[in-house]
Image: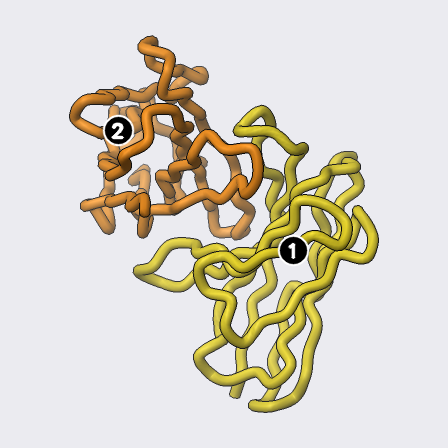
Chain colours: A orange, B yellow
Amino acid sequence: AQTVTQSQPEMSVQEAETVTLSCTYDTSENNYYLFWYKQPPSRQMILVIRQEAYKQQNATENRFSVNFQKAAKSFSLKISDSQLGDTAMYFCAFMKLNFGNEKLTFGTGTRLTIIP
Amino acid sequence: EAQVTQNPRYLITVTGKKLTVTCSQNMNHEYMSWYRQDPGLGLRQIYYSMNVEVTDKGDVPEGYKVSRKEKRNFPLILESPSPNQTSLYFCASSSQGPGNEKLFFGSGTQLSVL
């Protein structure tokens, strides 16, 4: 079974600074997907970024980028030039490459607060 | 607008009183699933469905039922709710395929069982 670990329950950073959220996972699979989801106070789950394990290049989406280290099973999220709207709960998630149950296995989340 | 609609957003009930949380998607997605979110535990899958009349258990199915009679709807049924089912529930859907499409989430249903 896959497990996802987020070791930082809470983090805070000053507006405009850069912050990195950590995520490690455990799997015996070789092909899979990794995700970061953002959950603001509205509760909506918003996909931030997605990484296919077979791609060596790290995914980026505007101010969001990942550091994907497949051998180390690490998938950290870097937020550059942080903004007040980045305040949210962030979940790392894993999905096995599978025709069938597209189940996401989530970490326990990191609550990020951007300080004005 | 493409969306997953859950109702209600908030629900307070008492132990043993049957309830249904509805979920509907307008994207013609084959795949739908239910998660519950609890503090310190992240989100955990309850049930999923790969198509009409095809459902299967996720990681925490005890105390829940689902049905998939139509492609767009995937209701979550609690026949006899208990306080340990107090949680935030999410419905999600996607086109069939291994990560080809992202999961679209509903807005969540906060359930309190007294």
Look at label 1 and name its amino acid: Thr
Number of residues whose C-alpha sits closer than 10 Å to that of mark 2, classed few (under 14), some (14–19) or many (20 or more): some
Could you tell whether A90 is left or right of A67 in the image? right
Could you tell whether A28 is left or right of A62 in the image? left
Question: Which quadrant of the view contains residue A79?
Answer: top left
Q: Residue shown at 70%/46% (left/top)?
A: B4
Q: In the orientation shown, which residue stands out farthest toward the top? A: A57
Q: In the orientation shown, which residue stands out farthest toward the right? A: B70
Q: Is A96 located above or below residue B54 in the figure?
A: above
Look at label 2 and name its amino acid: Ser
Question: Which quadrant of the view contains residue A55?
Answer: top left
Mark 1 residue element: strand
Q: Respond whether the residues carrying marks 2 and 1 are from the same subunit.
A: no
Q: Is A98 located above or below residue A7 in the figure?
A: above
- The residue tagged 2 is A76
Q: Nearer the viewer, residue B107 or A87?
A: B107
Q: Position of residue B72 (x, y in %)?
A: 79, 48
Q: Residue shown at 56%/90% (left/top)?
A: B15
Q: Position of residue B3 (x, y in %)?
A: 72, 41
Mark 2 residue element: strand
Report the Cα–Cα distance between label 2 and label 1.
34 Å
- The residue tagged 1 is B55
Could you tell whether A88 is left or right of B110 in the image? left
Q: Chain of mark 1?
A: B
Q: Residue shown at 22%/21% (left/top)?
A: A69
Q: Position of residue A39 (x, y in %)?
A: 46, 45
Q: Nearer the viewer, residue B19 or B60?
A: B60
Q: Residue shown at 53%/78% (left/top)?
A: B112
Could you tell whether B53 is left or right of B79 in the image? right
